[in-house]
Image (spheres, rainbow, N blue to C red):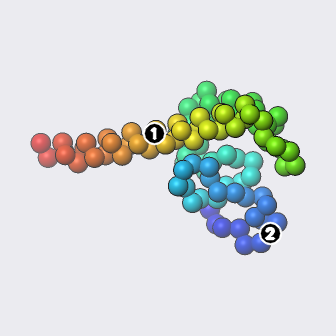
């Protein structure tokens, strides 16, 4: 996704909330599609259920919304860690 080059575009986009991700996504989404697909479906449902109550342009997010967002971020971190661990394990066992 390309980086916004003007103020109005910047207000409509933000960086993916996954730790370390540099991709930009529309303000209506929490994460880029790559990372969003790592979030368990039950958490995706919770985020969407709390999104409209929890995150409005000119208001503060609710505690519940922040809680499920943090759970989603942790879920992505865990998924990426499992992938790295499996990849390292495969490096050592592929020639055995």
Numbered label tally: 2
Pointer 2 residue: 7
Residue at left offset 61%, top offset 38%: 70
Q: Split into 4 quadrants, where in the image is the C terminus?
A: top left
Up-down relation of residue 28 to residue 78 (above or below): below
Task: Identify whether 87 is placed above or below 21.
Answer: above
- Residue 13 percent location from the top left of the image: 73, 58
Mark 2 and mark 1 in contact? Answer it, CB < 8 Å. no
Q: Residues within 10 Å of mark 2 (few under 14, many from 20)?
A: few
**Quadrant in the picture for residue 44:** top right
Which callout, 2 or 1, points at the residue further toward the start of the chain? 2
Q: Is residue 48 visible?
A: no
x and y percent of residue 33 in the render?
A: 59, 48
Residue in the foreground of this view, choosing between 62 and 27: 62
Give the SS element for disc 2: helix
Residue neighbourhood size for the residue with mark 1, other residues' Cα within 10 Å, grouped as few (<14), some (14–19), many (≥20): some
Residue 37 in which image quadrant: top right
Q: Residue at horizontal 79%, vertical 61%?
A: 11
Question: How far, Cα to Cα, is label 2 from label 1?
Answer: 34 Å
Disc 1 designates what residue?
79
**Front residue of this view, candidates 6 and 78:** 78
SS at mark 1? helix
Q: In x, y percent, where is residue 1?
A: 62, 62
Q: Is residue 93 visible?
A: yes
- Left or right: where 6 falls relative to 93: right
**Which mark identifies residue 34?**
none
Q: Residue furthest bottom?
A: 5
Residue 85 vertical position relative to residue 32 in the rendered view, above or below: above
What residue do we see at 80% from left, 69% from top? 7
């Amino acid at each position: 996704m390309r980086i916004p080059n003007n103020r109005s575009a910047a207000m409509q986009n933000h960086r993916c909330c996954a730790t370390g991700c540099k991709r930009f996504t529309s303000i209506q989404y929490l994460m880029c599609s790559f990372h969003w697909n790592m979030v368990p479906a039950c958490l995706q449902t919770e985020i969407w259920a709390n999104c409209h109550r929890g995150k409005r342009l000119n208001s503060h997010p609710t505690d519940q919304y922040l809680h499920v967002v943090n759970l989603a971020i942790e879920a992505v971190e865990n998924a990426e860690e499992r992938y790295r661990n499996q990849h390292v394990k495969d490096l050592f066992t592929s020639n055995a």
